[in-house]
Structures are given as structure tokens and as C-alpha cells.
Amino acid sequence: ILDAAEAEFGRRGFRSTTIGGVAAAAGVSRPLVYRYFGDKETLYRLVVERLLASWHDALVGAATPAAPTTAHRLRAVMAACLEWAGRHSMLRGLLLRDSDLTRRVAGTTLDEGRDRLPALLERVLAEGVDRGDVRADLPPAEMAAVLTDVIVAGAVQTMAAEGAGRATTRTEAMVEVVLHGVVL
């Protein structure tokens, strides 16, 4: 049911999605959807929560400390974020088209999700400072905030991109620019 709801909300937006449409897409009855989820707003909030949990799991899995360098870890986190965004392009509609509603219905969930990436990056960067492969002249929290902005912007662009090839090219370019700069 949640898969069908994600697809329906992503395709139609919150206002045009109906419980009947979700039920039909899931191959179940409307009363069953109401019994498990109560109403459309609750179903929407649960879809957003599930999407953000999936995103966080992908990022944490990519940030493995076993990578040989912090650059490898950051590359993996950035790539995982953008690859995830490419697979969940419907999220763009959920967050952008229905942003006011999403903020009202799932604001706390969004805030928690938003805070997860910089916290993860700050931890990776602080460990990199300790290992000696990340610059120590900038606070890890500040570097994490900048990286978060870049990654989130890249994720939105990836969700808007057509085709996995463009997303892969953008991912590689973004990683190179962020980790190695643009000037010689």
C-alpha cells in the first residue's frame, strides 16, 4: 500500500490523490486503506517518513569507516545520495509541488531528515581531521553544512534529470568539483 501511495502522491500530488486511487493501485479495498492508515494525511506522512528513512539508510551504509580515506567515504555518501535521488524522482513532486502541505503534515519528519545528512557528514569530516586527511583549519560542522547544501542541490537536480546516465555524469562531476575544486 505504501509503494502504491508513494507512486500516486508522486504522480498526482497530494490534492489529486485519492484513497480510492491508492487502493486501486495497491490492489486492495478502500476500507482496508482507511483501516490501516486512517486518512490521506496520515498515509502521506508515512510515505514521507519511509522515503526519508530509506535515504538515511543509504547514506549511513555508504559512510562506512572501512573506506581507505575520507575522500572515498565522502564520494560514497555523495554518490549514494544522488543515486537514491535518481531512483526516487517522485520525491521531487512530493516535496516541491506540495511543499506547504508536506511542511504542515510531515514538518517534524522533514526537519529530522534534513538534520541527518549534516550530522553524518560532520562525523565523517571530524574523523578525517583526526586521520589527517581533511583540512583542520575549518570546523567540520561548517564544512558539513556546505557539503549538505551542495549534495541537496545535486539531489534535486538529479531527481529532475531524465535518465540514469545524466545522473551518473552529474554525480561524478559534482564529486570531483567538491572534493578537488575547480582552480589549479
Image (tube, rainbow, N blue to C red):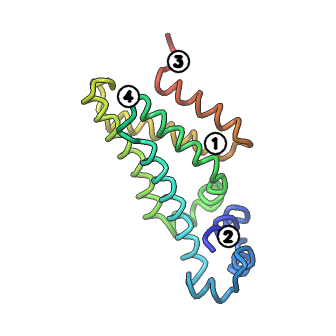
Tell me the CA gap for discs 4 and 2: 40 Å
Direction top: furthest residue: 184
Tell me the CA gap for discs 1 and 4: 26 Å
Q: Residue at x 53, y 25 (%)?
A: 176
Give residue 110's position: percent from left, percent from top: 47, 59
Q: Which mark is residue 182?
A: 3
Toward which corner of the image does residue 83 lie, by quadrant?
top right
Packing grade of label 2 (10 A; few <14, some 14-19, many >=20) is some
Give residue 45's position: percent from left, percent from top: 53, 70
**Label 2 SS:** helix
The reply to whether dot 1 and dot 4 touch (C-beta < 8 Å) is: no
- Mark 2 or mark 3: name the one nearer the start of the chain: 2
Tell me the CA gap for discs 1 and 2: 22 Å
Q: Is residue 184 left or right of residue 24?
A: left
- Mark 1 or mark 2: name the one nearer the start of the chain: 2
The residue where tag 4 is placed is 69
Tell me the CA gap for discs 2 and 3: 43 Å
The residue where tag 1 is placed is 158
Direction left: furthest residue: 130
User: Of tags 4 and 3, which is closer to the observer?
Assistant: 4
**Label 1 SS:** helix
Q: Is residue 104 above or below residue 144?
A: below
Q: Residue at x 47, y 64 (%)?
A: 107
In the rendered structure, which amino acid carries the disc numbered 3? Val
- Mark 4 or mark 2: name the one nearer the start of the chain: 2
In the rendered structure, which amino acid carries the disc numbered 1? Thr
In the rendered structure, which amino acid carries the disc numbered 2? Ala
Give whichever of 115, 133 is nearer the camera: 133
Give residue 171's position: percent from left, percent from top: 59, 34
